[in-house]
């Protein structure tokens, strides 16, 4: 059991990646829990970046512009292209079909969808997977500056260390929850 407070940036760590993904899917209502409940605050809105985002793109014949329009309230082409440009899609990229995007391009499109949602709780399952160093650096900076709540998991040590102000370890048979940096957590675990 845990309570997330407003504006916390919580890294979920542990040896079982499937457990963390399952927890995030339960938090987002994509899976039912075996027991217990999830209760969101009345003023929260959530946006989710799943580790597997294929369902958002595979089988779709949409262009990037059409996809953004469908996942936002943007109407004008210039507004959509502006957002795509922020995520390193320029010029003719806007006419590219979403079903041919690389893994990194898909993650950038999902981040665009999250930003346009205006959510005040971001849930990111391995967001750095498939991203190049420039994109990871931009995402890292954006999450540090994001003034609201972030729940995430990542194998990138520097990413976790610079963003998280709380660590929750969900290793099977073990639960750890403390307001601490990632390096402090690792030091505690080493001394146990």
Image: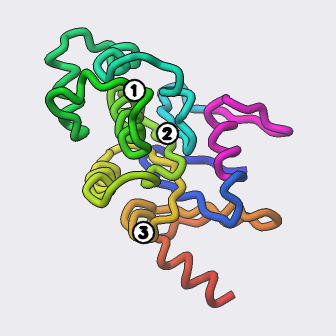
- Mark 1 vs mark 3: give the one in front: 1
Residue furthest to the right in view is 34
**Residue 93 in picture, x, y percent from top left:** 23, 30
Q: Which of 8 and 64 lies nearest the eye of the viewer?
A: 64
Magenta segment boundaries in residue numbering = 20-39
In the rendered structure, the answer to whether residue 34 lies left or right of residue 87 reads right
In the rendered structure, the answer to whether residue 152 lies left or right of residue 112 reads right
Vertical relation: 164 (above or below) 3: below
**Residue 172 in picture, x, y percent from top left:** 79, 63
In the rendered structure, the answer to whether residue 44 lies left or right of residue 140 reads right
Dot 1 surroundings within 10 Å: few (below 14), some, or many (20 or more)?
A: many
> In the rendered view of the protein, which quadrant contains the C terminus?
bottom right
Q: Point out the tag, 1 or 3, that comes first from the N-terminus.
A: 1
Dot 2 surroundings within 10 Å: few (below 14), some, or many (20 or more)?
A: some
> In which quadrant of the rendered view does residue 80 lie?
top left
Vertical relation: 92 (above or below) 134: above
Q: Point out the tag, 2 or 1, that comes first from the N-terminus.
A: 2
Residue 161 badge: 3
Q: Secondary structure at mark 1?
A: helix
- Mark 2 vs mark 1: give the one in front: 1
Q: Secondary structure at mark 2?
A: strand
Residue that carries the numbered disc 1 in the rendered image: 98
Q: Residue at x 69, y 35 (%)?
A: 38
Q: CA distance from mark 2 to mark 3?
A: 20 Å
Q: Residue at x 56, y 47 (%)?
A: 4
Residue that carries the numbered disc 2 in the rendered image: 49
Q: CA distance from mark 2 to mark 1?
A: 17 Å
- Mark 2 vs mark 3: give the one in front: 2
Q: Which of 61 and 41 lies nearest the eye of the viewer?
A: 61
For the residues labelled 2 and 3, say whether their Cβ atoms are less than 8 Å apart. no
């Amino acid at each position: 059991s845990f309570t997330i407070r407003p504006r916390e940036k919580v890294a979920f760590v542990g040896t079982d990646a499937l457990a963390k993904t399952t927890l995030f899917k339960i938090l987002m209502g994509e899976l039912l829990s075996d027991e217990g409940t999830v209760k969101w605050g009345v003023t929260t809105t959530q946006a989710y970046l799943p580790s597997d985002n294929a369902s958002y793109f595979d089988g779709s014949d949409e262009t990037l512009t059409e996809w953004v329009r469908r996942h936002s309230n943007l109407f004008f082409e210039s507004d959509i292209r502006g957002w795509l440009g922020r995520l390193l899609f320029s010029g003719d990229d806007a006419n590219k079909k979403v079903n041919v995007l690389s893994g990194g391009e898909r993650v950038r499109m999902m981040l665009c969808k999250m930003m346009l949602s205006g959510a005040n709780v971001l849930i990111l399952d391995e967001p750095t997977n498939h991203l190049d160093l420039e994109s990871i650096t931009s995402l890292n900076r954006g999450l540090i500056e994001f003034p609201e709540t972030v729940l995430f998991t990542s194998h990138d040590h520097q990413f976790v260390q610079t963003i998280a102000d709380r660590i929750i370890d969900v290793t099977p048979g073990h639960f750890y929850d403390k307001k601490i940096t990632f390096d402090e957590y690792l030091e505690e675990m080493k001394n146990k």
